[in-house]
Image (tube, rainbow, N blue to C red):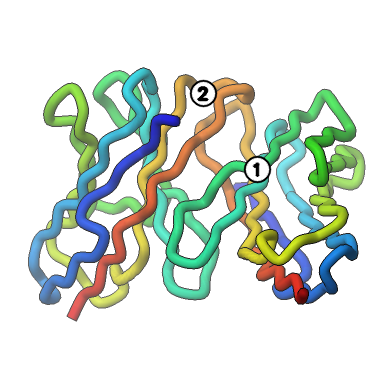
Amino acid sequence: GENVEQHPSTLSVQEGDSAVIKCTYSDSASNYFPWYKQELGKRPQLIIDIRSNVGEKKDQRIAVTLNKTAKHFSLHITETQPEDSAVYFCAARNNAGNMLTFGGGTRLMVKP
Amino acid sequence: EPEVTQTPSHQVTQMGQEVILRCVPISNHLYFYWYRQILGQKVEFLVSFYNNEISEKSEIFDDQFSVERPDGSNFTLKIRSTKLEDSAMYFCASSEGNLSNQPQHFGDGTRLSIL
């Protein structure tokens, strides 16, 4: 089955700096890659996703890149703000099923 | 914006007891899911449900687990005889469909504590 690895597990940045979180996946049939943000005690919220037919997607300060050959995808947050502090999860899914396979999460701390 | 709602937010149960976790998916969604997250670990898929039957399940979803859509709005997860290792946060999710442009939306979760 699919295995998703996520790095780093914790990331501390100064406000205004960029943050990059990386994920690798094992199943070449995976074709959908969402990113979720989870604040303490709250639900995972979808912040951006990418499909395997594109290499990059951007939404304001958030961007995601996908390298299908290398089987890795990354989340980029620019101009970080304290409210970006949360745990971020990457996930992967293939066409054969509905299940999302999650990475281990990254705790992002943005210091003011 | 419509949300997935889950009740209760926290459930404390004695080991060996049955527990039912409840979810109300977003109203026009057709696919429903349960995931769990043991403290400090990954979010893990349990089961997906479509058209009143299980469409996919993981190894975790053994005979102790069952799901049901008892009426037009609720979606429940039952654990028949709880074990200590069932202690986790349980998330319900729903999606309009299973295409890649129909993402899964999560509820706030139920924290299940088995004593």
Give me the C-alpha separation between circle 1 and circle 2. 18 Å
Residue lying farthest to the front in this orientation: A112
Query: Which amino acid, by three-letter code, is at mark 1?
Result: Ile
Q: Say whether residue A23 is left or right of residue B15.
A: right
Element at label 2: loop
Q: Residue at x 58, y 48 (%)?
A: A101
Mark 1 falls on what kind of element?
strand
Is B57 placed above or below B30 here? below
- Which residue is the site of mark 2? B98
Residue B33 falls in which quadrant of the image?
top left
- Chain letter of the residue carrying label 1: A
Mark 1 vs mark 2, foreground winner is 1
Depth check: give the residue in front, A78 or A3: A78
Instruction: Identify whether B22 is placed above or below B48.
Output: below
What's the amino acid at mark 2? Asn
**Residue A33, percent from left and from top:** 70, 39
Q: Is residue B84 left or right of residue B46?
A: left
Residue that numbered label 1 is attached to: A47
Q: Determine the image quadrant of residue A105.
A: bottom right
Q: Residues within 10 Å of mark 1 (few under 14, many from 20)?
A: some
Q: Are marks 1 and 2 on the same chain?
A: no
Residue at 76% of width from left, 38% of height from top? A28
